[in-house]
Amino acid sequence: MTVTGIDAISFYAPGRYVGLDTLAAQRGIDPDKFSKGIGQHLIALPGHDEDIVTLAAEAAQPLIEQAGTDGLDTLLFATETGVDQSKSAGVYLHRLLNLPANCRTVELKQACYAATPALHMACSHVARKPARRVLVVASDVARYDLDSPGEATQGAGAVAMLVSANPRVLSLGNISGVFTEDVMDFWRPNHRRTPLFDGKYSTLRYLNALSMAWRDYRAQGGVEYADFAHFCFHLPFSRMGEKAHQRLAKEAKAACDLDQAASGLIYNRVVGNTYTASLYLSVLSTLEHSETDLADQRLGLFSYGSGAIGEFFDASVQPGYRDHLAVDRHRALLDERTPVDYDEYLSLWHAADDPVNGNITLPDTARGRFRLASIEQDKRVYLDRLA
């Protein structure tokens, strides 16, 4: 059987952030409610000319520069904050990355879950055609109403993964436990810019989906809890990962060791919620912050998308994986960001939506290579500064 999985992985976060202590001061809230209550410190904020396409391009470009495009015949773009009701964001990304024209490109949506079926679809494709490769990108901007219970769980970012046969970073297992139920814990009607949600109910549905997906995983022949070195979870906020880990240990009738999930929470605390990308940001955080070599160790992964779908699956860390990570680049991306005050935060939060008359020129505020320069007659115009 062909071994498939993640051959290379990269992330990107925008160059500005607001501290949750700033929000707490403005709202008259004890800052511990954010730092200790939900375990969050910073919210990544895209500029006026950054969106899911530019974030995705920034995350994926380093992988294309390193690995080239030979054999890359599929681009899967996962998001729940799409920029068009019809055209895939992946098609914009395809041009910015100068990918081959003979490429299958599609956008996938199911709340925060969509990157996981994209990853499995990619593995199935390269299992049938081992010489081929697939680019999977998860990119989102998590924005909630001002002064709402969700405001502190905003964020933005993208994770790009190159999927291949005989991967150098992670191989994916062949067994998944899945669970679906029709619930209204988080949703965003087409006419709304921000989502509607019931936070406490969503937490309950998340934990229930985790239990049910774990039971299905074990029933399908998945390995025992004790066989995992670390666990990575979908993270709307980092404390959710701790709750999930406690639930999973209880479900498995095992002692709960929070250290098995701790390294996966680090990036989330300073980036915020990245929706489809959050599980894979947790995976990257685990790989890049674990003090010991994780080669040949197994990770347990739980993906959740409100509405709701949960999936538990496993991945094995490949020998020599550290040689294929971009730890210094990723940490520099976070260290070199600029904090904003509350007024600047409000300005970015109110960043221009698509204008009613379909025309706008956007200020040049993106820190990266790619930017949304304008919208002309409802057509989005993306620029590559190096083109």
Image (cartoon, rainbow, N blue to C red):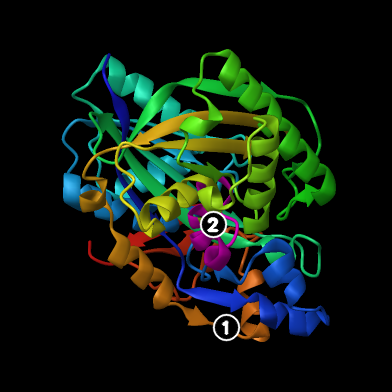
Q: Position of residue 323 (x, y in %)?
A: 20, 52
Asked if the residue under mark 1 is in contact with the one under mark 2, i.e. CB atoms within 8 Å, the reply is: no
Disc 1 residue crowd, few under 14, some 14–19, many 20+, Cα 10 Å: some
Is 140 or 217 nearer to us in this picture?
217
Q: Is residue 116 above or below residue 334?
A: above
Residue 250 quadrant: top right
**Residue drawn at (45%, 63%) of the image:** 13
Name the amino acid, label 2: Leu
Q: Locate the C terminus and report the quarter of the image it occupies.
A: bottom left
Q: Is residue 43 above or below residue 292?
A: below
Q: Which residue is rendered at x = 74% and y = 65% of the image?
A: 37
The amino acid pointed to by label 1 is Val
Residue 244 versus residue 58: which sits nearer the camera? 244
Q: Which residues are magenta?
A: 263-277
Q: Position of residue 24 (x, y in %)?
A: 75, 79
Determine which quarter of the picture holds residue 12: bottom left
Residue 198: where, in percent of width, then height? 83, 48
The foreground one among 387 and 58 is 58
Quick one: which residue is furthest to the front in this view?
255
| First-in-chain label (2 vs 1) | 2
- The circle on residue 265 is 2
Which secondary structure type mostly characterizes the magenta part of the structure? helix
The label on residue 12 is none
Residue 196 covered by magenta stretch: no
Mark closer to the observer (2, 1): 2
The circle on residue 340 is 1
Q: How many marks?
A: 2
Asked whether residue 114 appears in the rendered view, the answer is no
